[in-house]
Image (tube, grey):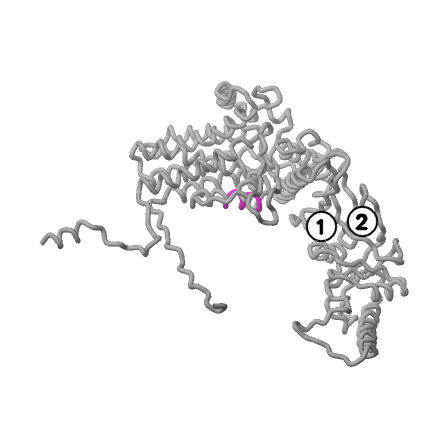
Amino acid sequence: MRGDLNAALNPIPLYKPGGGEEKAEIARLSTFAGALAVGDLVKSTLGPKGMDKILQCGGGGPDSGKLLVTNDGATILSKIGVDNPVAKVLVEISKVQDDEVGDGTTSVTVLASELLRETETLLGQKIHPQTVVNGWRKASTEALRVLEQVAEDHSKNVEQFKDDLLKIARTTLSSKILQGKKDHFSKLCVEAVLKLKGKTDLQSIQIIKKLGNNLSDSYLEEGFLLDKRIGMNMPKRMENARVLICNTPMDTDKVKVFGSRVRVDSVAKVAELELAEKEKMKDKVEKILKHDCTVFINRQLIYDYPEQLFADRGVMAIEHADFEGVERLASVLGGEIVSTFDAPDKVRLGRCKLIEEVIIGEDKLIKFSGVALGEACTIILRGATQQILDEAERSIHDALCVLSQTVKEPRICYGGGASEMLMANAVTQLAEKTPGKESVAIESFARALRQLPTIIADNGGYDSAELVANLRAAHASGKNTFGLDMTNGTTADMSKLGILESYHLKRQVVVSASEAAEMVLRIDNIIRAPPRPRQRDMRHH
């Protein structure tokens, strides 16, 4: 009888050793803790007065000791190794925001974590998670409806739309390292994006980083730049060039069969082998020249002998162009990458009006002007340290992404917390009209939205309680374009200050954050699978 009682009281093991689960409240506390930690980590980088983070690579790998200085939310979250399952969800939404829009990665993470912070209070009041989810859905629908109502579209007026793009670029760059030179860089970014003629593929905009001088010496160069040098004794300038872009071995002193050996009984036989290799390479060069090209660009190395043959024929040869450079070059010149040379009539050559060597700083680069793809251009970034250049590149990339998306979806709305406060007030009004417990959940959504301008003010060292109260009062009196002026620490009219943001960006922040928070809120169990047992490798024992 006693044995049966013990068996009944002891839980039956359901999982293999190493596995387990966390249930109900414990699971929720665990998930919320991870989400709030991620939100707190990136919170201080939000807004024009946000601070930077240093990410240092530890361990003994090849990147050991490398530094990364950034305030980009997606970069910070992608580089830190998070173990908490919900923290990984927030990392994922910041990555999606970065891929989809290019900016707003910190905003989406902070909004999702603030929604989950509000949830702790709601669950403490015994409100069921499904009730909270229903309330949030109604709140996000209302917020997006109001945002769409106030969004403005100036794409019909070309001059005003270009001015809007400049203002959006300035707003995007004002929270980055380029804040002090945002006017200069916003012009560069807008010029580069307008060359795309409505395309969102940034492949034809190249960014080259060169140490030296300072950030204000950066400039936009027409055409395409390749960070390589032209071979010896070859023409350094070529007009109306016909370019053959290849990925083929042009070396002769390697035997390509793994583990093979060549046995000879005299030195003369070695000379015969070398001669045969030379003849083989000469035949390959002749096949290449039958394509009627004046410039030969190869992904791999070009050894001295084939280089000499190209030089004798007056063909410019460029070796070891990195794969990304070759792919982009083929796209820009309108050619294709070739590996075999038996059918010259079927190969499409790239076209270019002028190829020449230019000097930037202390380095020589090859400039392609008058390329087939007219929108191709290169932004040359100058800076004092590699960390500054890397962060400037990330900032420029964010601005280019936002601008290209704005050209595609031209509606704009006001920044500086104006849109968030507008949505929050509309959601609060909805909560007042909604009966039952759902109204509490809807009001919590409004509080989470108001946290964004609060955090922006806190990061600037201002009194956030007073500023946000003043902003709320301004919006209640119908001043929908009012937001936070972080230069003077007051509320001001964003339309006069020119602080604009992309409607697509704002919409994506609300959609992604509410969906991610909703998914986390539904969790009531965390089940950990046991690690896969590894069999010992006995082959070498």
- Dot 1, how many residues are within 10 Å of its Cα: few (below 14), some (14-19), or many (20+)? many
Q: How many marks?
A: 2
Q: Nearer the viewer, mark 1 or mark 2?
A: 2
Q: Which residues are magenta?
A: 92-99
Query: Do the residues under discs 1 and 2 have CB atoms within 8 angstroms?
Result: no
Where in the figure is residue 46, as x and y percent of width and height? 55, 32
Residue in front for this viewpoint, 86 or 47:
86
Q: What secondary structure is the magenta-colored segment mainly? A: helix
The reply to whether residue 407 is visible in this rendering is no
Q: Is residue 7 magenta?
A: no
| Residue located 52% across and 24% down the image | 458
Q: Residue at x 60, y 29 (%)?
A: 48
The image quarter containing residue 433 is: top left
Query: Would you say 229 lies left or right of 79 here?
Result: right
Of helix, strand and loop, which one carries label 2? strand
Q: Residue at x 48, y 33 (%)?
A: 40
Per the image, the residue denoted by label 1 is: 204
Is 9 placed above or below 342 here?
A: above
In this picture, is 327 found above or below 211? below
**Residue 98 magenta-highlighted:** yes
**Image quadrant occupied by the N terminus:** bottom left
Looking at the image, which is closer to me, 91 or 98?
91
Q: Earlier in the sequence, mark 1 or mark 2?
A: 1
- Residue 469: x %, y % from top left: 48, 20
Asked whether the viewer can see residue 329, the reply is yes
